[in-house]
Amino acid sequence: MPKQPFKALLLQQLRRDVAMLTGIFTVLLIWLALIGELRWTQSFWISLFLIAMAIIYTISRAARISATRNVSQTISLSEVERTRRRAQQQVLDGFSQPALILTHDRIEYSNKAAMKLFNLPRPKGLSSASLRHPALLNTIAKALASRQAMVCEFNPAYRTDEPWLAELVVLDTTEVPARLLISLFDQKSVRLASSARSDFLANASHELRTPLTSISGFIETMKGPARHDLKAWPRFIDIIDQQVSHMRALVKDLLSLSRIELAEHMAPTTQIDLTAYTLEAIKSLIPQAKARQVRLKPPDQTSPLIIRADPDEVKQVIVNLLGNALKYSPEGSVIKIELGQATSASEAEAACSRRKTGAGRHTIIRHEKMAGPAAWLRIKDKGPGIEEDILPRLGERFFRADASRGGPIEGTGLGLAIVKHIMAHHKGGIAVETRPGSGTAFSVWFPCAKQKL
Amino acid sequence: MASIQYTEQSMNDHIVTAFSQELEQLFANILRMGGLVEAMTNDACEAIVIGDVENANRIRLRDTQVNQLDAENEKMITEIIALRQPLARDLRSVLSALKTSNELERIGDLAKNIAKRAKPVAKTNRPSLLKGISELNSAVIGQLSGVLDAYRNQDAEQAIRIWDQDDKIDKIYTAYCKDVLSEMKAHPDLISDGMHILFIAKNLERIGDLVTNIAEFIYFLVTGNYLTLTERLDID
């Protein structure tokens, strides 16, 4: 509850009276001094009285500021301050979400979105008149009194499905009167984000259920109609085995995805040699490549490339990308692996990109603030390529480029999602270049560790 | 009808700036009260529908805040009339503030009464009976919000629009009452619940009436004419 303005009213009357008396006595003093009726002591006492009056006047002025009156009106601003405030107001105009600046109990400025939300005819006014919502007003009063940032959830139109979140920040804690920045967020989008999470869960359980259904179907067949058809059993068992390994891969990928997400906010600290890890990964995949009659062409680069990264995650990135390349490579083709170093992230990205006519290119993620030199890795296969219009969807969970083709290639649909998360964790980047019919190249780049010479 | 919009000047062009500030403060107080009763009505109806007795009890306590604001407004208005002797639009705005404050206080009382009925209604074995309350509530809240916006913007046109839309609430109310009555006839064990529900509906309908009164005050404030009389003349 704000204090009522009667105290302030009395103060104003007192001030008016004091000013009047001071004026009368000043005129009297001058007049008496002019006609020479004043002795030295008398003029001394009258001057003292006038000074006392002036002091009372000043005090009453100062007292006014502490009352809950619309202080902002009475304070005159310097030109510098006014310019600063105008700039702040222009910043608000740039916001797409509703935002207001309050000076004490008065709205100093509100942007278009806020005017629309609160149905305000103009950007200014007393906050209690314009915002009206008790929960919001109480939080504003608390934030003004404590000078601390606060949040408040409220429902501007009293519709149960449209909650808004107000964030209140005191702009300058030393300023008198206090100024508040209120930004409002539609919680609908938050609801949508949580529904995206439940979508993921639904997807994951669907992906897990598909192999389960097929396994239980074959087991039922083996127990029922095919009980004595022992010749068909090995085929059934093969299929069951396939499905089980698919499920195992899926669970493994889901677990590593959740582990990476959990650690995503902690920057990696270890320093590793990208060249060594790449060579090691190539070596581990040679048997698989031989089985598919694909040749892995190792990089020319043999000198170490020291990067700041998590060893397990880097291994997973290389194995996932190489595994993808192997899966899509036709028999007898070559997978080209290249490594290199560049002076900056954008240089690295440029080094990875070999623009060819008819090739589509898409950067899946890129860390904007990556500074210093970067090491890059490029893996190019001679597979069927990816159509350009689905490039932006790469890295989505359970998205498979070949899903529509219904091809024989199997995967969990999580491999690239994992790579994307790892690269985000390392503040690096990942890009893809592809030309339908002639192959796909994935490139990743990591920030280099600060070299100790 | 030309809409007469509130401008910064209309309240701030007095020679004695303190007077302008008092008027503005009064105006803000009324709207603060409006916000309180708006939230109270809505929360009380929500509490009824979901059967949240605890919250309903808390809502009842909020009425003291409304009464306090009403008393403060009255004191402030008396002081303004005694000290400033307002004329013309100032006089109208002070008078309509007095009456609006009074109506808002009554809306607060009605909302408190609704909240009071949460406890007996919470035990009802027929929650479908409460469905109409949400509908009636959203219509009433829409009217109340609209009239408060009209008061803040000093918009006579919107006041007329609100005043015209009261039939909508009346229609919902009559239809709902019929439903509840027929339910009560069919199931005599629902009589006590049904009676409370009818009272809640009646209170909401009364709030709608008080809102139209406020719309009349706004019209009077802005134009100096009485809405009921002019509108009747138009019809004739």
Image: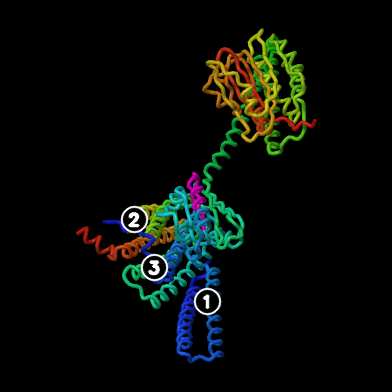
Its colouring scheme is rainbow
Distance of label 3 from label 1 (alpha carbons): 33 Å
Percent across and percent down for residue A96 are: 49, 44
Q: CA distance from mark 1 to mark 2?
A: 46 Å
Q: Are marks 1 and 2 on the same chain?
A: no
Chain to which the residue tagged by mark 2 belongs? B
Disc 3 chain ID? B
In this rendering, position of residue A398 left or right of residue B98: right
Mark 3: amino acid:
Ala
Q: Callout 1: 10 Å neighbours few (<14), some, many (20+)?
A: many
Q: Is residue A12 above or below residue A223?
A: below
Residue A134, x across and y down, in percent: 51, 59
Tell me the quarter of the picture where residue A169 sits.
bottom right
Q: From the viewer's side, name the closer residue of A245 and A373.
A: A373
Query: Dot 1 corresponds to which residue?
Result: A57
Return the residue found at the far right: A453
Residue B124 visible in the displayed image: no
Mark found first going from the N terminus, 2 or 3: 3
Q: Which residues are magenta?
A: A85-102
Q: Is residue A335 visible?
A: yes
The residue at which mark 2 appears reads as B158
Q: Amino acid at mark 1?
A: Tyr
Where residue A265 sits in the image (x, y, percent)?
68, 39
Name the residue: 59% across, 20% down. Answer: A433
x and y percentages locating residue A299 in the rendered image: 72, 16
Q: Amino acid at mark 2?
A: Gln
Pinpoint the chain carrying mark 1.
Answer: A
Taking the spot 46% from the left edge, 72% from the top edge, the residue there is B71
Evaluate if marks 2 and 3 touch, with contact meaning CB atoms under 8 Å apart.
no
Residue at image mark 3: B97
Residue nearest the observer in this picture, B13 or B228: B13
